[in-house]
Amino acid sequence: MLIAIFQANLFMRMRSWKFRLYPTRQQLQELEAHLTISKTLWNDMLELTKQIYADYSYFVTTRTLEEIGKGSGLHSQVAQNIAKRLRNSMRGTTARKNKGMVAGFPRFKSTERAKSLTYPQSGFSLKGKTLKVTPFGEINIKVHREIDGKLKTLTLKREPTGRWFAIFTTEINCRTKPLKDGQPIGVDLGLMTFATLSNGERIKKPEHLKRYEDQLAFRQRIFSKKRRRSCNRRKAKVRVARVYSKIADTRKDWLHKTANSLLAKYSIIALEDLDVQGIA
């Protein structure tokens, strides 16, 4: 009986950890080159999939897609992950069509839409302040908190601002926590206010975009005046992306603080189950 209770209090869950990377100039060039290769590989796989489907009305297997990735210049794990993502996208397309929904093929990727390289199982190791990744070598990383659990996957991601991040996923053992002595509360998300609580309390919208709208408008005006495909236009685009990144970081920080304040005060929080897609 005691063993059953102990097992019921334990459960496994996945957690992600995001850290800033500081690659050297040579590593940056190699990372950008691998993003270009991954983009080309995705497009080649998608082109073959569409051609086979048009000729024979069925999708190619994951093994066939993985064969295309061999010899592409990418790490084998990264190439296999691209094939798996494309295969999952095809399955999602089929599932939506079976439900009577409008669904099309995945899109071909441009250079700007190729943003990440994923290592699902191996090819990386983290030691102290360096992250060793095949074939880029040791990359400086800012580990600002201790990682809990065993490392499962690694994703190297480039943001529109040009910054690179390492995103790890780990599997950790969690124990259910006892309920607090706080009161239960209901939360209703709204349009005029961010949320209204069942006790009448209202949480106002922070309006992060309004705080930066003048700065954003200034950067966008400069960007719109630059000649297309020029170096100055690319630089101006990065400056616009930095403002958007600041807005996103501010919004995320506010959401975390608001959620933590509710969790600290109330024991049970109830939310309305809305069909947002149906309402839209």
Image (cartoon, grey):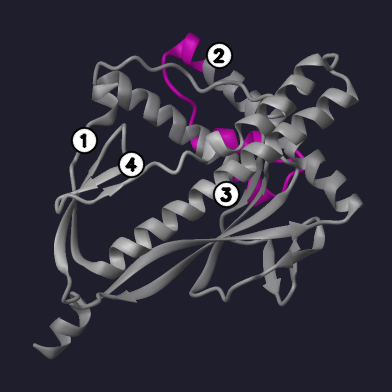
Precedes in sequence: disc 3 or disc 2: 2
> To which residue does mark 4 refer?
194
Image: 101 above or below 231: above
Precedes in sequence: disc 1 or disc 4: 4
Q: Residue at x 80, y 29 (%)?
A: 236
Precedes in sequence: disc 3 or disc 1: 3
- Amino acid type of the residue tagged 4 in the rendering: Phe
Q: Which mark is residue 51?
A: 2
Q: Quarter-wise, where is residue 140 in the image?
A: bottom right
| SS category of the residue bearing label 1 | loop
Image: 129 above or below 275: below
| SS category of the residue bearing label 3 | helix
Precedes in sequence: disc 3 or disc 4: 4
> To which residue does mark 3 refer?
249
Q: Nearer the viewer, residue 257 or 231?
A: 257
Residues in magenta, as a range: 51-80
- Judged by depth in the image, the label closer to the viewer, 2 or 4, is 4
